[in-house]
Image (cartoon, rainbow, N blue to C red):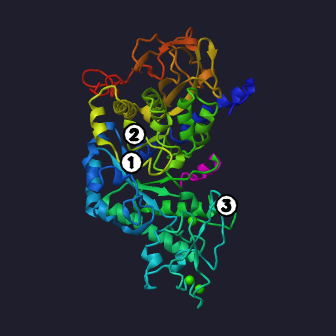
Amino acid sequence: MTIATTGSMNRIINSLPIFLFLFISLFSSPTLAQTPPWVTQTNIYQVFVAKFGGNLQGVQNHLDHLQYLGIKTIWLMPVFKSMSEHGYNTTDYYAIKDSYGNIADLKNLVSAANSKGMKVILDLVMNHAGANHPWFSASDPAQRKDNWFIWSADDKHWQKPWGGGDSWSRDPYAELDRDHNGNAHDDDYFYSVFGATMPDFNYNNPNARKEIIDEFTNVMRFWIKQTGVSGFRCDAARYLAENGPDPSARRDQPATHEIWKQLRANLNAIDPQAILLAEAPTETYAEMLKYYGAGDEFNSAFHFNYQGVLINTLKNERRPGNFFSDLYAIQSHLPPGVQDTLFLSNHDAFTGGRPASQLGGNIAKLKSVAALYLLLSGNPAIYYGEEIGMPGAGSDAAVRQAMNFDLAASQKQDPGSLLNHYTRLLRLRNHYDALRGGITYFAKSAAGGNWDCLACEAGRVALIREYFGEKILVVHNFTSNNQDIRLDLSKTSTGLDIPDGASVHALMGGGDFTAISSANKANYPLGTVFGFTSKILYLGNIPQKYRNAANNYPSYENALTGG
Ligand SMILES: [Ca+2]
Ligand SMILES: [Ca+2]
Ligand SMILES: [Ca+2]
């Protein structure tokens, strides 16, 4: 997308970060705010248990890897009893899959993770059960919950909510009189947008809806009380309620938001610190924002589609014109106390495949795209194996290969490896408030005299992370060529007041920098940024709280040895 860059358009676009700052200041001024909710300043590591140690004990055995990396939240893909390896067709919401272990194993894993400074969240599948769940398949009608599912006399051939296919399946127990009206065969089909093994719950029937919400409230309470987990990643969050045959009437429905708000209120009553994280790959960002409600629905949601913006920046060696508008489409509109979640890929091939495959195994590009998203506002969610450059694309099986722990071990020994690049960046992010909690401001930059703009395509980007006055400058070169970069750090460019006389300290890329002054502010010489590398600069004196006993502060270069 290319946005016309008239003067007035620039002013409108450049005012976005200012609006952002005012918005956040209003709701979370330092004098009012206590500790910010943990979900606003974390990072996430997505674990497919079967592929990451094989079972819960195996995950626990590899916690050192995650702690070394700097991970703060572990998302375990489904661990409940289910019909498949991926686990999204649950057969018992109160039991651990046999091959993964038992409830005590999960409790031990959560305790061990907590003791290493990491929280654990579980995958929760509330749109559908597994077709072998007794609620759907028990021969004893007292065990079945026929009114929890959606029945039809025939296949209505409705498209799936995302278009194409068929949303109905034939009941394997067609002899059952599912609607209890004396006719065994006017209910032989059930609604199931993810196929015959995953019957959708019936949130459209008020009685069933109340019962199902109560049941899932019990499920959440059970796992929080039994194991100490810190929340839930909610699968297929946009598909709960249906409102007719049109595909658009079976996604993002008002009733779906009402249900999540109820679940969130119920969860708050169980544990006010526990979170809900939405998988809601909506068609528009306006629909995505609705999953935050007024801060009373999800605590975070995956920023779907932005993974393509991030990857394409390195694929094309050029940031696209919508780089900031797509970021701000969510981040400038968030209610207080919640956070955006950015990611490069996940377990679903539809999100694009692993970065190593999308970027042709080019380590320099993989490092650059990692720096790009790990240093942006929003919590980064790392898919297991991404940090060591595992390949995989084209099919779900291809993106779900077993974690290569041998490769991880060898990369740990190499200070220049991709693993240690992730480690260095996450350690910086965890250490500096503005890199962890700050919002993102754009700063104009020039290479060879050509100044960019907020909505410009460019082979680089300069941005400032800001958190209650703390400012950290981040500059990326997305091209293979070295760029001699100058920055416009004036308020006109950035929307920020950077005081004259502010000293400048390298947190990545080294070098000595001249203090910011009225004479150089609008044309600040950053110097050479090498191809596919980044610079991080702290603007102002580095406070004592960031320094160790020897008065040193962590930088990218010393992050592995402690600063
Ligand atoms: Ca039937
Ligand atoms: Ca019937
Ligand atoms: Ca549904």
Q: Eyeballing the image, is 252 above or below 410?
A: below
Q: Is mark 3 within 8 Å of ligand 3?
A: no
Residue 109 in view: yes
Residue 111 in view: no
Percent position of residue 53, x then y: 29, 50
Q: Amino acid at mark 2?
A: Met
Specify which label sits upstream in the sequence, 3 or 1: 3
Q: Which residue is mark 1?
A: 401
Q: Secondary structure at mark 1?
A: loop
| Cα–Cα span, label 3 and label 1 | 33 Å
On residue 390, the disc is: 2
Q: Eyeballing the image, is 11 above or below 201?
A: above
Q: Are marks 2 and 1 in contact (CB under 8 Å)?
A: yes
> Of the residues tagged 3 and 1, which is closer to the observer?
1
Viewer-side residue, 91 vs 188: 188
Percent position of residue 60, x then y: 27, 50
Q: Quadrant of residue 227?
A: bottom left
58 relative position to 368: left or right: left
Q: Secondary structure at mark 3?
A: helix
Q: Amino acid at mark 1?
A: Gln
The magenta span reads 285-296
Q: Amino acid at mark 3?
A: Pro
Q: Which residue is mark 3?
A: 247
| Cα–Cα span, label 2 and label 1 | 9 Å
